[in-house]
Amino acid sequence: MLKTKFSGYQDAETKITLCKDIELIYPYDITLPDPPPAEQIINFGLPIEEQYFKRIEQPKGLIDLCKLDDVNVAKARLKANDDLAYFVDSVWDLWETGQWQYIRGVPTYITGDYLMYLSFNRIDVGLPAYRSWDKDKFQWWEFAVKNNPYCFGGIEMTRRRVGKSYIAGFLANSSTIRNKNRNAGLQSKDDQSAGVFFKTSVRNPLKSFPFYLRPQTSTNFNTKGNKIEFDMPDASFSANELDSWIEYGTSESKFFDGRKLHYYANDECGKNTNANVYETLEIVRPCLTEDEAIIGKCLFTSTVEEMEKKGGANFKRIWDDSDRNPKNPPDLLKIDENGRTISGLYQWFTPATHNYICDQYGNAIINAPKEYQVEYRIEYLKKLNLNTDEAYKGGKELVDERINKQPQGSKRQSEIRKYPRGIREAFRSSNTECHFNIEILNKRLDDFIYGDNPHIAYYNLEWKDDIEGGMVDGKWVDSEVIAKAATEATGKFKIAWLPLADYRNRFEMKYGERCPKFSYLGCAGSDTFKFDRVVDDSRKSMGTGYVYWGFDPNVDAGVMNDANWTTADYVCEYINRPPTVEKYCEDMLKMCIFYSVEMYPEYNVDHVTKWFIKRGYAGYLKFGTKTKKKNGVIVEEENIQAGAHTTERMKPTIFKAMTRYVETTAFRCRFPRLLEDLRDVDYHDLTPYDSFMGAAYAIMGYHEGIDKKPTSDEKVDIGNFLRSY
């Protein structure tokens, strides 16, 4: 209706979705407050071209009072002026209710916190400018976090210079000065940084608040200190003291242990190498509760570019445990039926493409700009003596160009870390300690930056007609394993290549045992978990399994470009945590039966080996060999156990095998989780890298004394395909 009366006016939408196009973050469905009648929305009646965000405008009389040196005189005059007193009351009301404004014809809800932040919270450049990405963040904080009884707070990572610390500091002020007996705690990556954070983002902005928004305090803002206490009554307004405080502490995890908090912020915690921020969160959460109720919220933030390896790993652990996706397989769920994640936090991330440039109204220009945005950008770039051709490009194109201009190598990766386009890039470390060719790994990971993986499909491997094969209740049962298509939420197996029909469920009898027929073509590897249940869900490892398939001329003989080969690579990935170890082992057995290959298990935990034997498939276990000298003769002997132990002596062999893979094949790897493990793996602590271990054992098993032979009597010329596989 408004569209016909006022050109360009749009109707208000109260049901919105945040983060709907950001990879690896489950979207937030938000319900905004109902708007007032259109005539009462700020900027109503103006042409849409003139509808800019409007800060709260103080009456001249109130501005004059703010200039007085004596605050008590200003308060007395305010109290005596009904109009000004009414205005001040309305400001406090807006802090609670927020405000609707037309911004270029779109009814836009501004939360109370964001309205106050823009109107009164001075930062290094003065009052902040309206930005649509900040508007979204404040809406997330208000409706997904602050008003959620099952959420302890948020975890945010972002690129530099977008004001995250100022916002985190403002939320500390907002939490404490609006209510009695409210406490806020602040920490940062180190003690000095905590002091800077407190000064620049809390104390200095609070000094700029008008007197009628700033509570009475005995704290001298002009002296150094780690605490602001609102501990004095306001005689001018007959108000008691708030008894609230804001304090910053050292970076040690236990600084606020046992203290009641209503707000807590840990700034740049991904750079903290002095303390484990995961442990800090464990200590802070009880500080935010009273009995069973959550009474406070916390915010953990980090700049992606500068995350240290140790601090970044702890930060990522919190991030992973904050995944809200209810469509994950049951064994990978990090959120319960009430909406509480393992960490208690909710994720927030803005891609660099979404906050790189904006138009004259503060709205992000992500894709190709509209005509009015181009005109504005041309004038803006002219003032800066920059190339006006950039005006025709959106944030995605500009960021892509910025990254692509850099040569492959450290400079390019540095630029990606400065301007991450997705979650995977945000956690991409410079990792100068990477044990493999980081350039190959990162270049391939670039292909997965927006979350899509067209190279794989999701399946479940099941017994045909639900008839379980092998030894069942002491009797042998013949059956086959089939692949059933599934979804991301239900599929346990990510499969890049289904074996040819003639390859599936094929076996032969050797020495009285059933053995897979195509053990010379491929091999499976596994890395199991130890226990069915763990006390701390956040610490549980995953069960992983991979199938590596060597170069197969029956599949790739006509493919000249090895970048397009299907084989000579991993073709199946399993990363899951079934309810029991037995179910995991059964999945590994079905994988080997379906692909007709042997299993080369990681033997530090022997669940897989025992299960294969119990189920009558001992012939599907691959045994390594060792070289010995007997009576002056070099001989090879088969190991007495299948697979291998991950020992210090074995590590060089593991890393040699994976180095070979990275140098020859990782440039076309279809599994980004494996690429990430290859990038991040720590030689001295392999425990967190389940994918790396499962994949390593698959490829080691494949290369372990394999007797290469053709798959048929037909001779195949593979001279053009020779490579060190």
Image (cartoon, helix red, strand yellow):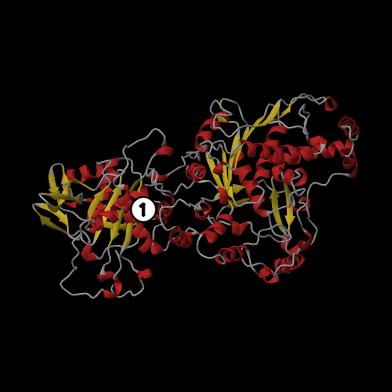
Count of marks overlaid on the render: 1
Q: Is residue 545 visible?
A: no
Eyeballing the image, is 224 above or below 467? above
Q: Is residue 140 left or right of residue 67?
A: left
Under circle 1, the secondary element is loop
What residue sits 79% from the left and 29% below the top? Answer: 216
User: Mark 1 = which residue?
Assistant: 491
Q: Is residue 313 visible?
A: yes
Q: Quadrant of residue 168?
A: top right
What residue sits 48% from the left and 51% below the top? Answer: 431
Q: Quadrant of the C terminus?
A: bottom left
Q: Position of residue 270 (x, y in %)?
A: 55, 44
The residue nearer to you, when weighing 372 against 184, is 184
Crowd around label 1: few <14 · some 14–19 · many ≥20 (10 Å) = many
The residue nearer to you, when weighing 600 against 585, is 600
Q: Position of residue 271 (x, y in %)?
A: 56, 43
Q: Position of residue 353 (x, y in %)?
A: 60, 59
Q: Is residue 680 left or right of residue 169?
A: left
Amino acid type, residue under disc 1 in the picture: Gly
Q: Is residue 430 left or right of residue 137?
A: left
Q: Quadrant of the N terminus?
A: bottom right
